[in-house]
Amino acid sequence: MPMIDADGCPINVAVEGREGAPVLMLSNSLGTNLHMWDDQTPEWAKHFRVVRYDRRGHGKSGAPKGPYSMERFGRDVLAVADALKIKKFNWCGLSMGGMVGQWLGANAPDRVEKLILSNTNFHYADKGPWNDRIKFVQDKGLAGLVDPNMERWFTKGFRDHAPQSIARMKSMFLATTPVGYIASCEAIRDMDFTASNSLITAPTLVIVGSQDPATPPAAGEAIAKQIKGAKVAALDAAHIANIEQPKLYTETVLNFLRA
């Protein structure tokens, strides 16, 4: 796994698949790392050069003091692509990864082939819940958020029947640095793509989880209305849809990218 410098922050990157194949970049949700795509990567790497990375503040990447911003995250992605000599890439981002994808689609349109925005949002008018979460982590750390997070991320049925997956995601969440988590929450709190999403020209698929309490289907449907020609696919899942519906998620993304 190469470590790539993005304006002084080391970004941990994993590259799999045939050299010369079209590139598919994957971007994680808040409080996870590149391994959240482990279920998808083997199949996708048969067709694409798959590039995964740990966002700053997460995984094995650096966690400089915040605040961060969606522009900062987007420029990190472009630094990774430049270092790997990737001119254009397909993008699949879930939750926070979908937010970064919206920035890229509007601000780096010459770099994005196709755009998949999964289980995500474009703006939070009410900053209160994010401010509350930031203060909680500042005061008490991440441990107190683990169980509530699992309830938002996965349906009760999945939590009951997939204890190994839940344990893996809990471990991933707790490995996140509080400094990186807080700075990322600030970036989410302050983002607003209401005006810029109309600038996106890449073919776009918006994936929603029909039981997603964190980024409800209405949020994804609103994004799709902002982007000309965008399509919507609904999966029977909560927030981390690629973990809860791994096979269907893999196929949904492949079908869109290969159409």
Image (cartoon, rainbow, N blue to C red):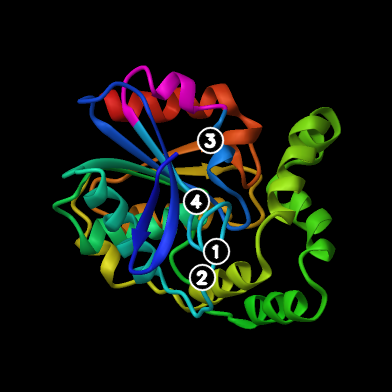
Residue depicted at 80% across the width and 39% down the height: 167
Q: Which comes sooner in the sequence, label 4 or label 3? A: 3
Residue hosting label 2: 188
- The secondary structure type at the circle numbered 4 is loop
Earlier in the chain: of badge 1 and badge 3, it is 3
Q: Is residue 141 above or below residue 216?
A: below
The residue that mark 1 highlights is: 57
Secondary structure beneath disc 1?
loop
Image-based side of 58 in relation to 229, left or right: right
The residues bearing labels 2 and 3 have C-alpha atoms spaced at a distance of: 21 Å
> Residue at (58%, 80%) from the top-left corner?
126
- CA gap, disc 1 and disc 3: 18 Å
Query: Amino acid under label 2?
Result: Ile
State the CA–CA distance, disc 2 to disc 4. 17 Å
* Residue at the disc numbered 4: 54
Image check: 200 left or right of 247? left
For label 3, the residue is 37
Figure quadrant of residue 193: bottom left
Three-letter code, disc 1: Gly
